[in-house]
Image (cartoon, helix red, strand yellow):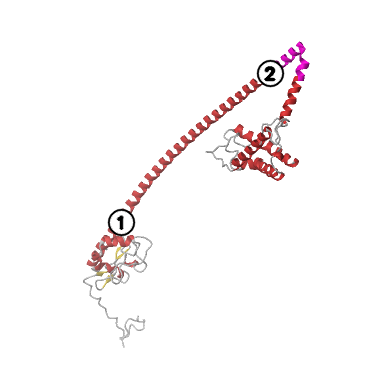
């Protein structure tokens, strides 16, 4: 029995049963090498195959070899990719409808169909299918590059237009700011002019009042001087006593006329009483009209338009009991207090705020305060 491949011991070398192992001849060399037609990150795949085709890793890239790929136009692929849909092909060789995060991308199902950007030739013979895959992949990359370049041009154009819009907006804002500044300066100039005119008017009014007061004082002084001179002259002539007697008689006659006169017709109302009744009725009518008037900048109020309860009587009063009952008198006084109350008078119906002259406005407030206090005192004494 022979042993092949076992090292003989020193004792076996002399044995006739030991023989060297037979020699094995190598397989005949392969005449044609077949490489995978797919592409990897470094270029063409270098995996050898016994027959032309794709390895298991690049099996999905075989979709580029199908004739249906050539029937999809560049416009269709571009519109499909710009809609953020998958650029891969389904089993029916139609564009995939899955959503992607961007343009010209593949979904998770067809990610292996994407050919790397480096599609250079691999060492050794190249399968004809790889040239087809390379050409169609380059066409897809060309469509992608053109779309991205167009998008970049659109972005650049939008950025330029946005810059122009911002420049125009800035210039418009500067113009508006300049116009507002000019209008503000014009308003300030007009306000300054109105203030100066108002001050000039106030100075003129004060000067006019001063002249009027001086003229009144001068006339009063002249009248007093004439009266004193006349009295001195009459006293010097010895007619002082007769003059006093005559003045007493005149005062008695005036008092008699004020009381209605004893010589008046029986049953006839004196003229003085009739005059006071007319004044009271006119005052009530003017007060009612004033209460129903709404003042505004177009309908300004003045000091003279306010129905002040003032009557031209020597004693400064009107005895209302002669014309009205106690209830009517209370109603009239109550309405007067309500009309001239300081809080209501200054805030109601723009009575005071519509007065244009500040001096006249302050005088109206002071007069209303005096009237309110006086009428309140009258109500307590009625």
Residue span colored magenta: 221-245
Q: Is residue 374 left or right of residue 92?
A: right
Tell whether label 1 touches label 2 (CB within 8 Å).
no
Q: Is residue 374 left or right of residue 358?
A: right
Q: Position of residue 55 (x, y in %)?
A: 30, 71
Residue 167's disc is none
Question: What residue occupies the far bottom of the structure in this picture?
Answer: 1
Disc on the earlier residue, 2 or 1: 1
Residue at disc 1, secondary structure: helix
Quadrant in which the C terminus appears: top right
Within-10-Å neighbours for mark 1: few <14, some 14–19, many 20+:
some
Q: Is residue 382 left or right of residue 192?
A: right
Residue 223's disc is 2
Name above or below for residue 38 compared with residue 223: below
Which quarter of the picture shows residue 116? Answer: bottom left
Magenta-colored segment: predominant secondary structure: helix
Q: Position of residue 352 (x, y in %)?
A: 60, 38
Asked if residue 124 is among those painted magenta in the image, a careful observer would answer: no
Which quarter of the picture shows residue 302? Answer: top right
Q: Is residue 18 left or right of residue 326?
A: left
Name above or below for residue 276 compared with residue 154: above
Asked if residue 227 is among those painted magenta in the image, a careful observer would answer: yes
In the depicted view, which residue is nearer to us: 284 or 363? 284
């Amino acid at each position: 029995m022979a042993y092949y491949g076992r090292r003989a011991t020193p004792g076996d070398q002399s044995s006739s049963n030991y023989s060297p192992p037979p020699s094995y001849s190598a397989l005949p060399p392969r005449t044609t090498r077949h490489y995978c037609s797919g592409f990897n990150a470094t270029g063409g795949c270098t995996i050898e195959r016994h027959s032309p085709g794709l390895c298991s890793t690049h099996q999905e890239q075989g979709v580029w070899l199908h004739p249906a790929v050539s029937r999809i136009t560049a416009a269709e692929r571009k519109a499909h990719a710009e809609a953020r849909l998958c650029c891969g092909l389904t089993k029916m060789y139609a564009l995939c409808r899955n959503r992607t995060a961007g343009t010209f991308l593949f979904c998770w199902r067809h990610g292996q169909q994407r050919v790397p950007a480096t599609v250079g030739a691999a060492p050794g013979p190249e399968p004809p299918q790889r040239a087809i895959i390379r050409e169609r992949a380059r066409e897809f990359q060309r469509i992608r590059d053109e779309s991205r370049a167009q998008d970049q041009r659109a972005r650049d154009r939008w950025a330029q237009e946005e810059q122009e819009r911002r420049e125009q907006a800035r210039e418009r804002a500067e113009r508006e700011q300049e116009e507002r500044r000019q209008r503000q300066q014009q308003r300030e100039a007009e306000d300054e002019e109105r203030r100066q005119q108002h001050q000039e008017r106030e100075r003129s009014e004060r000067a006019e009042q001063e002249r009027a007061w001086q003229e009144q004082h001068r006339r009063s002084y002249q009248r007093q001087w004439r009266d004193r001179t006349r009295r001195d002259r009459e006293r010097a002539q010895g007619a002082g006593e007769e003059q006093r007697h005559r003045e007493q008689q005149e005062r008695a006659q005036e008092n008699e006329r004020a009381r209605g006169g004893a010589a008046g017709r029986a049953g006839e109302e004196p003229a003085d009483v009739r005059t006071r009744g007319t004044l009271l009725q006119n005052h009530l009518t003017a007060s009612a009209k004033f209460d129903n008037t709404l003042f505004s900048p177009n309908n300004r109020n003045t000091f003279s338009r306010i129905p002040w309860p003032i009557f031209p009587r020597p004693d400064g009063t009107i005895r209302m009991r002669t014309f009205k009952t106690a209830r009517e008198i209370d109603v009239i006084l109550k309405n007067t207090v309500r009309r001239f109350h300081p809080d209501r008078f200054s805030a109601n119906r723009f009575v005071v705020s519509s007065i244009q002259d500040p001096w006249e406005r302050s005088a109206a407030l002071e007069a209303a305060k005096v009237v309110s206090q006086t009428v309140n005192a009258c109500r307590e004494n009625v």
